[in-house]
Structure formats: C-alpha cells, structure tokens
Image (cartoon, rainbow, N blue to C red):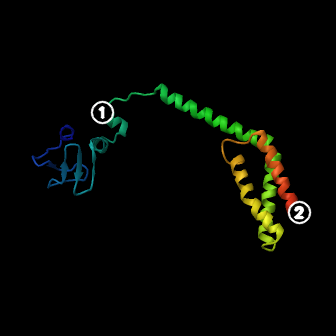
Amino acid sequence: MPEVARRYGLQIRRDGMCSCPFHGEDKHPSMKIYKDSFTCFACGAHGDIFTFVQLMTGYSFKDAFLSLGGTYERHETKTARAISQSRIRTTKTQRKLKEDIFKTGGKIFRELTATIELCKFIEKYHRPYTNRWCIALDALPELNNIYYEVFCTKDGKKEADGIYILTRCRKVRQRIFSGA
C-alpha cells in the first residue's frame, strides 16, 4: 500500500501519516497508510489498495485490479459444467414427474381433496362427538398424510397408490354417510 500511495505522489512520513488527497487542502496529515489499507481520520475515506486506486483514478474495480498488475483468468471446470447439467436433468425429471402426477392422478387428486374437505367441513360444522364427527376426525390425519406423500413430495405416486387412495376415500365417504 505505501508503494502504491507513493506512485500517486503522496509523501508518507515514517509513522505512516500523509496528507489526504480526497478532501481539499490538508495542512496536517490526516491519512494513515497501513501495510494493506488506508484510513483518513478527517474525511473518513478508508479501504484497501483497490479502493485507493479506484478513488484516485475513478476506475472500476476490474480496471483498478488490472492496473495493479492483476490478471483475470476464466476458470470453468468440467466438474462445474457436470454439476450444472445434473441440476438441469434433476429439474426436468421433477417437472415431468409432477406433470405425470397431475395428468394421470387428476381423478385421484380431486377425490382425495374432496374427501379431505368433507372431513374438515364435518369437523367444523357438525356436533362434536357424534358418530359422523368421530369418523371424519379419525380419517383426516391419514388423508392429509396421503395427500402430502403423493402430491407434495418428489417421489410421486405409483399405480398401486392410486388404487389404494381411491379405495380409502370411498370407504371414508361410505362410513361418513352411513354413520357406521
């Protein structure tokens, strides 16, 4: 940092103090130049060597970096490319799985949500501790669990799951409407 400051014409004393070039006339040195940074105690300017060059020249960070002898190299590894392609494949697979669930599982989805809504309605508007109320309350956690597993996870449904879900929903509805 002291070497770069001298390149821009600053006179640095032994204690590291110099006149600050960022705020008008500075009769008493108010900027301290450290090994790898600077601080002006009058105007508050501070930063590292790149910030100093940016303030002195008006350069962007990249130009300041290059003016100090830095070089940019583009590092693109096969690993990064492979990771990116893997993420794309995973996203496409998940999207296709969701599309399949909602295309083939549309009837299952509608049946399950309708049964859940019915149970919630009975829980909310029927007299507590009646037979219908107890059946709905008992079935609701299982139905919610099925809904979450089938439609909210990336695993999706299997054909056997669809048959099981439809059968379970029908049985719950039968029990609710028959009162048994």
**Which residue is more in the foreground, 108 or 175?**
175
Instruction: Kindly identify which residue carries mark 1.
Output: 67
Residue that appears at 14% across and 45% down: 12
Image location of residue 149, percent across then percent down: 69, 48
Q: Which residue is mark 2?
A: 177
Q: Nearer the viewer, residue 90 or 9?
A: 90
The answer to which image quadrant residue 162 occupies is: top right
Q: Is residue 61 left or right of residue 169?
A: left
10 Å neighbourhood of mark 1: few (<14), some, or many (≥20)? few
Tell me the amino acid under the disc marked 1. Ser
Using the image as rendered, state which of residue 138 and residue 34 is in the foreground.
138
In this view, 92 is above or below 30: above
| CA distance separating discs 2 and 1 | 82 Å
- Residue at 34 percent of width and 29 percent of height: 71
Q: Quadrant of residue 52?
A: top left
Specify the farthest residue to the front. Answer: 180
Q: Is residue 39 left or right of residue 144?
A: left
- Number of marks in the rendered image: 2
Nearer the observer: mark 2 or 1; the answer is 2
Residue 164, above or below 134: above
**Residue 147: % across, % down:** 73, 51
Q: Amino acid at mark 2?
A: Phe
Q: SS class of the residue under badge 2? A: helix
